[in-house]
């Protein structure tokens, strides 16, 4: 026959068995939250150190996070090794960090990785790999990747040459303000390549690029006014204006 004390002990044991899994879960969640908070804080501090050009501090804070597969930390290390910021410049190491970030879906890293494969930086030149990574980034809406992918289609690097697809991607980049994409798109409209020939629309894009400071676009504006090309009237004063602007 159970004594009262034994019954109390038994009830306590049963209660602990019931609540223990919940207590362990609560502990795990709390621990994860603390680790996550510390990781986010370290990332913020590391990025702040990078921005103020304290690269030694940035490396100290970002390296553990990058090794734990934090995509932004890994990308920043890729930038540091690519340009020799606080570390010895090493394209092969930069490539490794870009790869880790790109595989996590980081669009900036995917674009950088695509560029490195395109030009053979830190790795053998691989246009197909370049196209793969640039497409991943472009589909996430990164304007520079959209421009880079458009140029691959225009030149037939790593993908079949397709001027219609080139126009498609260059237009996306141009609409987001990439001046070099605006110039390329304008020239394609002027030539009727990948799209119907449209002189007026072509010069609209060229002028947009010129007003953003693109030197070649400004030269194109000057020539158009000087020689009366592309539907522009001959206007020497405007030609001189754009010539002067192109030299700044």
Image (cartoon, grey):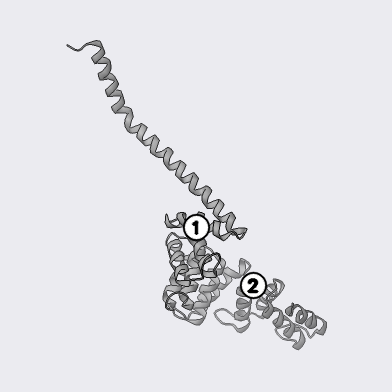
**Residue at x 61% of width, y 79% of height:** 189
Quarter of the N terminus within the rendering:
top left
Q: Where on the picture, by quarter, is residue 236?
A: bottom right
Residue 238 or residue 17, whichever sits in front = 17
First along the sequence among labels 1 and 2: 1
Task: Count the labels in the image.
Answer: 2
Marking on residue 37: none
Q: Is residue 3 left or right of residue 217?
A: left
- Residue 19 in picture, x, y percent from top left: 33, 28
- Residue 156 in picture, x, y percent from top left: 47, 81
Crowd class of label 2 (few under 14; some 14 to 19; many from 20; radius 10 Å) = many
Q: Is residue 190 left or right of residue 36?
A: right
**Residue at x 59% of width, y 82% of height:** 192
- Residue 117 in picture, x, y percent from top left: 45, 74
- Residue 207 in picture, x, y percent from top left: 70, 75
User: Farthest residue toward the right?
Assistant: 237
Marking on residue 73: 1
Crowd class of label 1 (few under 14; some 14 to 19; many from 20; radius 10 Å) = many
Residue 28 or residue 92, whichever sits in front = 92
Marking on residue 179: 2
Task: Kindly indicate whether the residue at mark 2 contacts the one at mark 1 (C-beta within 8 angstroms).
Answer: no
| Relative height, residue 105 to residue 35 (above, below) | below
């Amino acid at each position: 026959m159970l004594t009262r004390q034994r019954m109390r002990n038994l009830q306590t044991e049963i209660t602990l068995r019931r609540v223990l899994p919940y207590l362990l879960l609560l502990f795990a969640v709390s621990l994860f939250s603390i680790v996550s908070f510390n990781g986010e804080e370290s990332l913020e501090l590391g990025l702040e150190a990078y921005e103020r050009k304290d690269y030694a501090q940035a490396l100290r804070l970002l390296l553990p996070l990058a090794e734990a597969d934090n995509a932004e930390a890994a990308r920043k290390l890729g930038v540091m090794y690519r340009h020799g910021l606080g570390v010895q410049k090493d394209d092969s190491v930069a490539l490794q960090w870009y790869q880790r970030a790109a595989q996590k879906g980081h669009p900036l890293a995917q674009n950088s990785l695509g560029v490195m494969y395109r030009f053979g930086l830190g790795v053998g030149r691989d246009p197909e790999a370049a196209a793969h990574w640039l497409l991943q980034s472009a589909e996430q809406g990164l304007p520079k990747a959209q421009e880079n992918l458009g140029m691959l289609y225009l030149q037939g690097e790593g993908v079949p040459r397709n001027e219609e697809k080139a126009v498609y991607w260059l237009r996306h980049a141009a609409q987001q303000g990439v001046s070099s994409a605006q110039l390329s798109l304008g020239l394609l409209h002027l030539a009727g390549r990948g799209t119907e020939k449209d002189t007026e629309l072509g010069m609209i894009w060229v002028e947009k690029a010129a007003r953003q400071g693109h030197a070649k676009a400004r030269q194109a504006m000057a020539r158009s006014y000087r020689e009366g090309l592309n539907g522009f009237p001959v206007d020497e004063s405007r030609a001189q204006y754009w010539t002067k602007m192109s030299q700044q």
